[in-house]
Image (cartoon, rainbow, N blue to C red):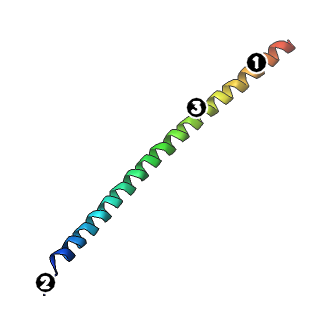
Amino acid sequence: MTEPLDMKYNKNQDGSSISTLRSQVTDVKNVMSQNIDKILESEERLNIFTDRTGDLQTTVSDAHLS
């Protein structure tokens, strides 16, 4: 017994929809990973600037004391 044409179409359409959703989820995961990497890089730069600011404040304080 064969399935009616409209049943076959619906099954193919469902498979295509699932494939499209999987592709979109993968794309979102990739973008999120890239954003997390950018945030981590920004945090590293911020820490470097914070350390440098602290060093400058120490140098200025030492210069005023001498």
Q: How crowded is mark 2: few (under 14 residues within 10 Å), some or many (20 or more)?
A: few
| Residue annotated with mark 1 | 59
SS of the residue under disc 2: loop
Which numbered disc, 2 or 3, marks the residue that appears first in the sequence? 2
Residue at the spot 26% in from the left edge and 63% down from the top edge: 16
Of tags 1 and 2, the one toward the viewer is 2
For mark 3, give the secondary structure: helix
- Taking the spot 28% from the left edge, 69% from the top edge, the residue there is 14
Query: Image quadrant for the C terminus?
Result: top right
Structural crowding at the residue carrying mark 3, measured as other residues with C-alpha within 10 Å and reported as few (<14), some (14–19) or many (≥20): few
Name the disc covering residue 2, or none: 2
Residue ID at (72%, 20%): 56
Of mark 1 and mark 3, the one earlier in the sequence is 3
Give the residue drawn at x 20%, y 71%.
Answer: 9
The CA span between labels 1 and 3 is 21 Å
52, 15: nearer the viewer? 15
- Reply above or below: 63 against 49: above
Residue 58 image offset from top left, x and y in percent: 77, 22
Tag 3 residue: 45
Question: Mark 1 is on which residue type?
Answer: Thr
